[in-house]
Image (cartoon, rainbow, N blue to C red):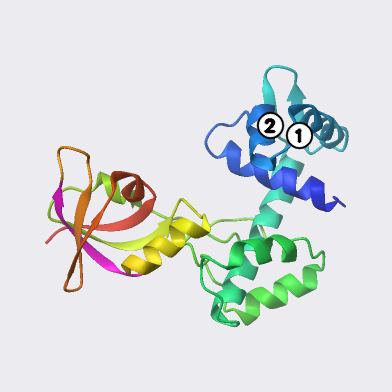
Amino acid sequence: MQSFTEENYLKIIYHLAEKNNSVQTNAIAEQMQTKPASVTDMIKKLAEKGYVDYIKYQGVTLTEKGKNAAIDIVRKHRLWEVFLVDKLNFKWDEVHDVAEELEHIKSVALIERLDEFLGFPKSDPHGDPIPDKNGRFAKTQFIKLIELKIGDTGTITGVSQHSSAFLKHLEKLGLTLGKQIQISDVTDFDGSVEIQVADKQINISREVAKHILISSNGKN
């Protein structure tokens, strides 16, 4: 059984490994907001327990045991986020920190009943897929809004930036999950994007557009 700190490390390594299979300790230190030396000490402990493989100067990789443990934590975190939004009326920008605390609950029976109570959701309030009890993710197909062309339409299905400030910004603009959008224009000068949502025209920066995920419907 892992400690809370060990679980946090496993989850951070898992998310970093989605971009690059071998994760550098400096990247982990940045995410954990701690010193690289402290990260190295923890990585050695995790390696001793069989959760990671670590070669100095070459980075960290999750073992099968470590990956399964990390996916279990991710599953609990995302289920709790759904519960907080759907049942307790939290906003999508308020749930992350609370779910960070709840994800460490060890009871397997509780999580299975939570999953059933929620109707076995496939994604969390930010559109991230929720693995089932066997660690399997439903297949998802989406592209970044920035990749759409003028005239393309689609549905907002997720975000890749989970900061409270970013989510509040999208909420203010009315760019929430499930909204239908169409690309009206893309500015040559700075890449900003004009989109139509219902009867409104909204301008967003290229940076914002990079973090909105879309299920594309092609052109109207």
- Does residue 48 appear in the picture of this structure? yes
Badge 2 density bin: few <14, some 14–19, many ≥20, Cα 10 Å = many
Q: Which residue is mark 2?
A: 61
Residue drawn 40% across and 61% down? 169
Residue drawn 77% across and 49% down? 7
Q: Label 1 near label 2: C-beta < 8 Å?
A: yes
- Does residue 177 appear in the picture of this structure? no
Query: Which element carries disc 2, helix, strand or loop?
Result: strand
Return the disc, 2 or 1, that comes first in the chain's sequence. 1
Q: Which residues are magenta?
A: 178-186
Q: From the top left corner, tell me how far across and down residue 208 is, in percent.
A: 35, 50
- The front one of 24 and 50 is 24
Which disc number belongs to residue 52?
1
Query: Which element carries disc 1, helix, strand or loop?
Result: strand
Q: Amino acid at mark 1?
A: Val
Against 95, is 46 above or below?
above
Residue drawn 21% across and 50% down? 193
Q: From the top left corner, tell me how far across and down residue 139 is, in percent.
A: 46, 55
Position of residue 186 in the picture relative to residue 154 (left or right): left
Q: From the top left corner, tell me how far across and down residue 179 is, in percent.
A: 31, 69
